Amino acid sequence: MWITLLTALLLSVSSQDLLVRNASVLDPDGDGWRHEMDVFVEDGRILAIGSELQDRDAVIIEAEGLWLVPGLIDLHSHLLLHPYNETSWNDQVLKESLELRTVRGVAAMKATLEAGFTTLRELGTEGAAYADVALRDSVRLGIVPGPRVLAATRALVATGCYGPSGFDPRWELPKGAQVADGVDGVRIAVRQQIAAGADWIKVYADYRRKPGDPSTPTYSLAELVAIVDEARSAGLPVAAHASTDEAMQRAVIAGCKTIEHGTHGSLATLRLMKREGVVLCPTLAAADAIARYTGWDGEDPNHPRIKDSRDLMKRALEAGVTITCGSDVGVFPHGDNALELELMAQYGMSPAEVLRSATRTAAEVIGMGDRLGRVAPGFIADLVLLRADPLIDASATRRVAVVVQAGRVVHERKP
């Protein structure tokens, strides 16, 4: 029988064993299913997978007709933002209080978790100081429900290369990231962010110099090398916002682990990323959302933003670069993270590749490939039961029935 929501709430504060029965379980490689399988969870980890497992003391989820996959992972999120068609980015940064934005972040985490995304990499608070660290810790302490959060705090930007911008230059306005310049300056900023609780460092390797201008590289190679070196000294990886080919090349050479967006990366640069083991987060959903906010009807494939996304994916797939799920959610509504997976499929990835991008691949990117991203004994029991087969249709990831996080049932959605 189905568990009740009350049972789910009780499980969220207990360590009771869990037995999922008769599910179609995703195989460890993510290419097929093991049908009519039971999954036994003890102390938050998968203990066994097999047929007709028994434990009379376990809470049982009858999962016949459901598809069991690992908890989904989004590696580019902004919990402290909400959609730009509700409130512009400038107004969120300049007019919304830190307290309001943090409360919104709590609601965003709940929506994300209920959508089956049990882990997030939070890539910049956009003017909300170190609120992502507070959100991360509030989940760890069991104060609020939410995904496992990896925080990047404030992000790094060069002088004159981020917003809010376009104001009378007499006024010194707060920025959406931490301004740092020069080799010594960026090292200091990285140290400050690490001390404040960062799990990752994010750097804007390119950006607009003034409103209306195209993006250009902003940090020198020497500065990027210093950022990566300082982060590496503390065991932290670096994510680079980069949409221009030159900035992408600099970030790859400097040793950044992921490239965010990558819009105008050439085939040669994408091949360089493959050789160096640098991963692409294409953030297709953000481009789609911004196109719609500016009047795109969702039909014309030649809209500049949409064409750029399609062309990027074509080059990336040809280059064989590793692609992971990173949606830039916050630009569009939290809980709609699966849009990135749908667009990946529309732009050329197979459903199996799409699912891996948000499970096994994403877990490996964040250094948790031995603990997350697979349904296998010994792995953390972050699990999602779906009502349709995501290896046939990527949009099946929207059809969430039950979400389990570290062995606790945290959400149940009735048919």
Image: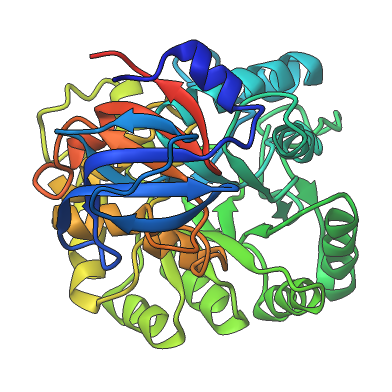
* In the image, residue 157 above or below residue 185: above
Residue drawn at 46 percent across, 75 percent down: 278
Residue drawn at 46 percent across, 13 percent down: 5
Residue lying farthest to the bottom in this orientation: 275
Question: Going by the image, does 297 lie left or right of 262?
Answer: left
Picture quarter containing residue 166?
top right
Q: Closer to the camera, 236 or 96?
A: 236
Residue 174 visible to an observer of this rendering: yes
Question: Going by the image, does 411 lie left or right of 179?
Answer: left
Colouring scheme, one of rainbow, by chain, secondary structure, one colour: rainbow
* In the image, residue 194 above or below residue 289: below
Looking at the rendered structure, the number of numbered marks drawn on it comes to 0
Residue drawn at 72 percent across, 57 percent down: 199
Q: Closer to the camera, 85 or 57?
A: 57
Residue 377 location (% of width, % of height) = 43, 63
Residue 304 visible to an observer of this rendering: no
Question: Going by the image, does 165 lie left or right of 354?
Answer: right
Q: Closer to the camera, 309 or 206?
A: 309
Residue 364 location (% of width, % of height) = 48, 68
- Quadrant in which the C terminus appears: top left
Residue 90 location (% of width, % of height) = 63, 24
Residue 139 location (% of width, % of height) = 69, 34
Residue drawn at 14 percent across, 33 percent down: 65
* In the image, residue 368 above or below residue 398: below
* In the image, residue 289 above or below residue 121: above
Q: Closer to the camera, 203 or 275?
A: 275
Picture quarter containing residue 79?
top right
- Quadrant in which the N terminus appears: top left
Picture quarter containing residue 104?
top right
